[in-house]
Amino acid sequence: MRARLVLVPLALAAGCGRHPEPGPAQDTMVHTLALPDLPPPDLPDAPGRATLLGACSTCHTLRYVLDQPPLTRGQWAAEVDKMRHTYGAPFPDEMTAPIVDYLVAVRGTP
Amino acid sequence: MTWPEKSPALILHTERPPNLEMPLEYLRHDLTPNDLMFVRWHLSGLPRSVDLRTFRLTLAGHVERPLSLSFDELRALEPVSLVAVNQCSGNSRAFFAPRVPGVQWSNGALGNAKWTGVPLRTLLDRVGLRAGARCVTFRGLDTPPIQGPAPFVKSLDVDRALDADVLVAWAMNDQPLPMLNGFPLRLVVPGWYSTYWVKALTEVTVLDAAFDGYWMAKAYRVPATEGAVEAPDHPASDTVPISRMDVRSLLVQPESGARLRVGAPCAMEGIAFDGGSGIARVEVSVDGGASWRDAVLDADLGKYSFRRWRLTWTPTQPGSATIVVRATSVSGEQQRPAPGWNRGGYMRNVYERSPVVVS
């Protein structure tokens, strides 16, 4: 195998105040992760927006919505169903329709 | 925006949980610097603190002698190193047509690194598989944000788990793993998509039955068809867990839409890799696929590594041109001339095509 390139990740040295070199004597025993506090994503205004915010943002950023391409109503309904029944999102059935309507309004296929 | 131990160059898809992509230009490193390795988490409850004084890797289940190891105990075992591509199953999902839901990765949910750790097989030999052992499950420190039925647990059949190249890695490019890439331990399943490369690995459990957890039984499944392809209006009825990476190549330079000049040499370059046989050949066309030339391959860093390639092209006439790249693996596998589709947006491996303008 060819000799390894020396690629020192600068962020390791600059970012978190601990030693990057392996070896028991040099490791900090407690490694922590300080996640940046980003402003919430700018979700377009449309009916159902407040319902979506209340039901979905407990578990994940709504930037997921903005990351998605235009999807069909069926695809969005399947996503919302997955969140409720697979991931256990604790919102009642009557909130499903306005959430799907909102998603179709802002990221639906034409 | 600053993510701990990460370059500000990474592209944000989501922040809770973090999903960060590497811009394509950084594939010009043989080994992807740790601060540029892409980040992908499924559940918002990712580990925020790891105390190496109390952290343990446990191996239990259908074994003779369950084992609990501290980080230092694990690192005291004889280590091995290998270079391997770490690629998300859904890398390049944004290019699927029709579009599919999921994180909309371009081509940057991959990187290449030197992984150092203990072969999983060494640990399984120490605990001793009992007769009838069928699969091994892997769980990390991440948790669902609410009580739910879907903690992130993956499994490998015993045969795959006993492959000598599957590692419990404690170093990436000779450095500790960044927290966002799975500190302190990460399962490395070279040649297979990184959905199996469980981060912050803490529980290894041997089962005497098949594992039916959500992340194997429902998610990360592909059509059980040749090339994992299905038609959007006729979804495949049979699916299987995604596994080995298919062969693919990427063009890194020139960038799509680049303006080239007649008579000026253009240094084309990119990468190619497959699921563990290595790359035999990369061919490049500058006329949309009508004729092909062999690219020159860089040094071979190992069969699981990506292989960089180069070829110089001096355009002779003005106008639009399309650069096309295709790779062939050592095992003889070739890329698809036309894109395949599946509902998950997985395993894209079509010929890479990139338009440029010559003036």
Image (cartoon, coloured by chain):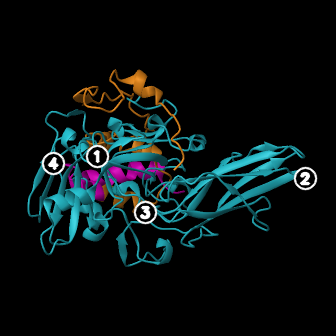
Chain colours: A orange, B cyan
Chain identity of mark 4: B
Q: CA distance from mark 3 to mark 4?
A: 26 Å
Highlighted range, magenta: A82-110
Name the kind of residue labelled 1 in the image: Leu
Looking at the image, how many numbered discs can be counted on the residues?
Answer: 4
Asked if marks 4 and 2 fall on the same chain, the answer is yes
Looking at this view, is B319 or B293 the one in front? B293
Name the kind of residue labelled 2 in the image: Thr
Q: Position of residue B331 (x, y in %)?
A: 53, 72
Mark before the other along the chain sequence, 1 or 4: 1
Mark 3 surroundings within 10 Å by alpha-carbon count, few (fewer than 14), some (14 through 19), many (20 or more): some
Mark 1 surroundings within 10 Å by alpha-carbon count, few (fewer than 14), some (14 through 19), many (20 or more): many
Mark before the other along the chain sequence, 3 or 4: 4
Asked if marks 3 and 4 fall on the same chain, the answer is yes
Q: Which residue is mark 4?
A: B147
> Does B33 sit above or below residue B139?
above
> Does A86 sit above or below residue A28?
below
Asked if the residue at tag 1 contacts the one at tag 2, i.e. Cβ–Cβ closer than 8 Å, the answer is: no
Name the kind of residue labelled 3 in the image: Gly
Label 2 secondary element: loop
Mark before the other along the chain sequence, 2 or 3: 2
Mark before the other along the chain sequence, 1 or 3: 1
Asked if marks 2 and 1 fall on the same chain, the answer is yes
Q: Which residue is mark 2?
A: B316
